Image (spheres, grey):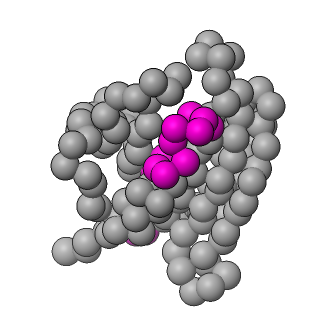
Amino acid sequence: MEVPTDWFVTATPQFQALFLAPPTPDAIRANLAVSMRPVKDDVTVASVAEAARANQEREYPQYEILTEVDFTDRGGVGFQRCYRWFNQSQNAEVLQVQTFFVVKQILYTLTATRSKSSVSPELDDLFDYMVTSFRIVQN
């Protein structure tokens, strides 16, 4: 995956890679998180997306889906959802784009997060570039 050189790269127990944008005045620091976890043979991106939606509706105040694209309908292997919600602790509206891939029993989840403010909309093109540059190289 291609990432801007001025972004900070780290990892957490939950995310195998976390790319943090340089700080801005926004309440939420823009970031792109990548997680990988093994799944059973019968798990599909559609089932993962449905479970994620159910969890997000339950956990995120003022949750609203903006767009969804199932790339399996187009011969691809992924699913992408753009949504917004209100983060009460930060008192900020959050915009997230979450993309799922299931390849050889591994679920890859890429989640781009930013504040929904006038300062950060230009990040959308950068997030799209980062996600579309993501490649799974099989040995």
Point 67% across, 69% down: residue: 69
Horizontally, is 30 left or right of 90 in the view?
A: left
Which image quarter is the N terminus in? bottom left
Rendering coords of residue 14 (x, y %):
40, 33
Residue 42 versus residue 115: which sits nearer the camera? Answer: 115
Q: Is residue 52 magenta?
A: no
Q: Is residue 116 magenta?
A: yes
Residue 110 versus residue 88: which sits nearer the camera? Answer: 88
Point 59% across, 44% down: residue: 96
The answer to whether any part of residue 22 appears in the image is: yes
The answer to whether any part of residue 37 appears in the image is: no
Rendering coords of residue 110 (x, y %):
46, 52
Q: Is 64 rendered above or below residue 104?
A: above
Rendering coords of residue 25 (x, y %):
45, 24
In the picture as drawn, the residue positioned furthest to the top comes out as 89
Q: Is 97 rendered above or below residue 134?
A: above
Number of numbered discs present? Answer: 0
Horizontally, is 85 left or right of 110 in the view?
A: right
Which region of the structure is painted magenta? 103-123
